[in-house]
Amino acid sequence: MSEITLVVRPRGRPIKNLPETITVQADGVASQIHQKIADASRFSVHRLRVTKGSDGTPIANTKEATVHDTGLRNKSAIDVKDLGPQISWRTVFVIEYLGPLLIHPLVYYGRPLIYGSSEAPSELQKITLIMCVLHFLKREYETLLVHRFSAATMPARNIFKNSAHYWLLSGLNLAYWAYAPWAPTAGKSNPLITYSGIALFAVGEVLNFYTHIVLKNLRRPGTTERGIPRGIGFNLVTCPNYFFEIMAWIGVALVSWSLGTVVFLVVAATQMGAWGKKKERRYRKEFGDKYKKKRFAIFPGVF
Ligand SMILES: NC(=O)c1ccc[n+]([C@@H]2O[C@H](COP(=O)([O-])OP(=O)(O)OC[C@H]3O[C@@H](n4cnc5c(N)ncnc54)[C@H](OP(=O)(O)O)[C@@H]3O)[C@@H](O)[C@H]2O)c1
């Protein structure tokens, strides 16, 4: 197949140096379209959204389809939109988890200043701190060294919205109520409840980590490939990673015995529930008969 010329049109705010046309190989990868426009306009390739002029469908920045596959032909028009400054998903995750990772020790060690109390923290408060720090350290590790994200970036302004959930709910909210001298966490522990909480937390975290390794191995580095996950939990529900995450937080709730933890848990579980349902629909659509439909997205036999 030969070279074809595409007519480039700006959409939304003006893009300096946007070329009027570009020439690409019809049987070359689709991502050359994005690359040529990015090179000419000196923008990051992730900042540009390219859609077909004829029907507005997005042209993916992918090496897994050719220009011909996208339906573009010689003299076809493409619309190019500047999405504004971008931030990588990895950076967003790192910043999100950094909040609670800093806030928990700050509130715990800042108790005399925050609550005006000179009492030593209780055993339960100490265990709550260790659990929260361990959880978010694990999430930072997974973000940097395990997850293989498909979407490279998101608009930079989204960082505030995305971080609020973690900084406010699992950071400030959880820490303030759990480390207070008047909190139930400051009292004596019931060993049965505390050890059950620690056990749930440990099992939940280990299995959640395991599911993340399973998901990682479905995608070769640098690709956006997707596969059908198999292994512990994946035969029962769509998102066992969410199930094990929730199990770990139930563990924290049992140890901290704090309403603040329960509030975070309920909001997080509601969010994961909605995502879990969406993921099940996506698997069914994407893999058809090869995918064994799951009745439950997160909780076997419940949801
Ligand atoms: N406490 C809370 O409020 C809360 C809420 C949500 C999540 N979390 C935690 O954060 C973790 C990650 O959440 P998430 O929503 O990003 O999970 P996810 O959608 O399951 O994705 C985890 C990673 O696996 C990849 N992946 C997922 N399904 C795949 C497939 N079929 N084939 C290939 N790769 C696949 C994803 O790539 P893509 O980039 O393509 O998606 C992503 O890099 C959760 O497991 C949970 O532990 C906590």
Image: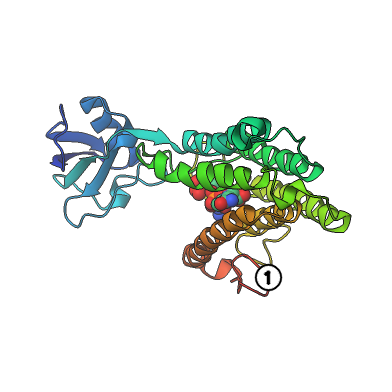
Q: Is 87 in front, or is 60?
A: 87
Q: Where is residue 251 in the image (x, y as percent from the top left)?
A: 74, 54
The colour mode here is rainbow
Residue matched to label 1: 300
Residue 221 drawn above or below residue 280:
above
Q: Position of residue 282 (x, y in %)?
A: 48, 63
Quarter of the rendering containing residue 40: top left
**Considering the image in quadrants, where does the N terminus appear?**
top left
The three-letter code of the residue at mark 1 reads Pro
At horizontal 77% and vertical 42% (from top left) the residue drawn is: 127
At horizontal 66% and vertical 43% (from top left) the residue drawn is: 180
Q: In this view, does 246 lie to the left or right of 46?
A: right
Q: Position of residue 23 (x, y in %)?
A: 20, 34
Could one spot residue 218 in this view of the protein?
Answer: no
| Ligand 1 lies under 8 Å from the Cβ of mark 1 | no
Q: Where is residue 95 in the image (x, y as percent from the top left)?
A: 50, 34
**Considering the image in quadrants, where does the C terminus appear?**
bottom right
